[in-house]
Image (cartoon, grey):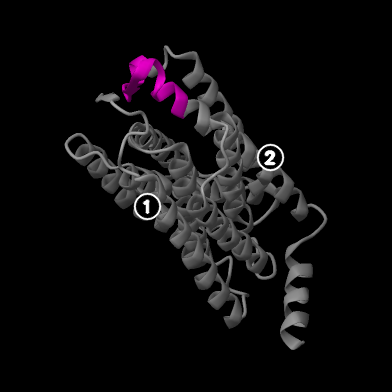
């Protein structure tokens, strides 16, 4: 009873009338993310060949349409982050996993298998629980120079790791590794977006903020390249599942450890974060096993490297 009262008090503090706007906006962004990923995947696999060369992909209308939808998803995420804490907005992207699975099941004229459905439900349940816990404890914080410096140093390490993964994929393609690396980079993108928006609202958009914008751009480019590699070796559901779990877990981790969005959270909330996050990760792992994740989804298909 006491915990419920404390949680209610935190919720009242965190969610003003405008804070709630971020949730439906983030849900709409998840829908665009799902369809954008589906169309990008179809563009990569068009004409019976798994294409990863950007110069070839930009000549495929389906791929361009998917990229446009992903751009819309990014804009909606920016809007959501304007209203709500990073810890609340970012995990909502897991709804894209449900949309992707349902659309692909309808296209194939068959429902998801039991293992696939269980994996999806476990991932979504973990993320939903995480959002529910975060909504009672997360808070917006003032972004300092130290916050930005720390994020940028960690981002440099993540980008270097992403480039190593991309180089490794030329010899040993791995959809899981590519998706995971892209998810980490996109988690940094969301964190930097939140930080830059915060600096703008504080009237403190100095040179360090410009460095943050530049770092954000680098992370987007490297992450996008890794996503195309993931499409070439894995299913749409695997790519979306990886992005919608690794991305928010990275962003939430940065929100907690670097920005301090959970500094006001009670100890029980951290136990909830760990349990919900573990459930989501296990769900993605089960989904990868269900799909034979590192095998091309088109029998006999070839992958062009670029």
Q: Residue 106, position in %: x, y? A: 60, 33
Foreground residue, 30 or 192? 30
Q: Which residues are magenta?
A: 41-56
Foreground residue, 53 or 98? 98
Label 2 and label 1: CA atoms lie apart by 29 Å
Q: Residue furthest right?
A: 17
Q: Residue furthest left?
A: 171
Q: Is residue 143 left or right of residue 82?
A: left
Question: Which residue is disc 1 drawn over?
Answer: 289
- Residue 199 shows up from this direction: no
Mark 2 Cα shell of 10 Å, populated few (<14), some (14-19), many (≥20): some
Query: Is residue 17 highlighted in magenta?
Result: no
- Tell me the tag on residue 28: 2
Secondary structure of the residue carrying numbered label 2: helix
- In the figure, 236 relative to 8: above or below? above
> Magenta segment, principal secondary structure?
helix
Q: Residue 69, position in %: x, y? A: 58, 28
Q: Residue 242, position in %: x, y? A: 44, 48
């Amino acid at each position: 009873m006491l915990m419920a009262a404390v949680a209610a008090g935190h919720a009242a503090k965190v969610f003003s009338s405008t804070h709630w706007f971020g949730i439906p906006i983030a849900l709409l962004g998840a829908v665009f993310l799902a369809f954008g990923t589906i169309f990008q995947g179809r563009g990569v696999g068009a004409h019976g060949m798994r294409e990863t060369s950007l110069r070839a992909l930009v000549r495929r209308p389906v791929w361009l349409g998917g990229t446009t939808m992903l751009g819309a998803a990014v804009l909606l995420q920016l809007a959501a982050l304007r209203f709500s804490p990073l810890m609340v907005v970012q995990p909502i992207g897991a709804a894209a996993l449900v949309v992707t699975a349902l659309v692909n099941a309808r296209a194939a004229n068959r429902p998801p298998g039991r293992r696939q459905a269980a994996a999806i439900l476990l991932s979504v349940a973990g993320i939903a629980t995480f959002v529910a816990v975060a909504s009672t404890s997360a808070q917006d914080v003032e972004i300092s120079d130290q916050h930005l410096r720390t994020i940028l140093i960690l981002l440099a390490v993540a980008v270097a790791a992403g480039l190593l993964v991309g180089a490794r994929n030329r010899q040993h393609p791995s959809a899981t590794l590519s998706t995971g690396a892209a998810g980490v980079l996109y988690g940094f993108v969301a964190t930097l977006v939140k930080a830059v928006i915060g600096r703008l609202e504080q009237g403190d958009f100095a040179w360090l903020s410009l460095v943050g914008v530049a770092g954000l751009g680098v992370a987007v480019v490297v992450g996008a390249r890794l996503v195309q590699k993931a499409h070439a070796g894995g299913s749409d559901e695997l790519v979306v599942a990886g992005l919608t779990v690794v991305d928010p877990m990275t962003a939430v981790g940065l929100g907690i450890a670097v920005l301090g969005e959970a500094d006001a959270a009670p100890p029980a909330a951290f136990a909830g974060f760990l349990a919900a996050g573990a459930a989501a990760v296990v769900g993605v792992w089960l989904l990868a096993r269900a799909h034979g994740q590192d095998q091309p989804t088109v029998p006999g298909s070839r992958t062009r490297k670029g």
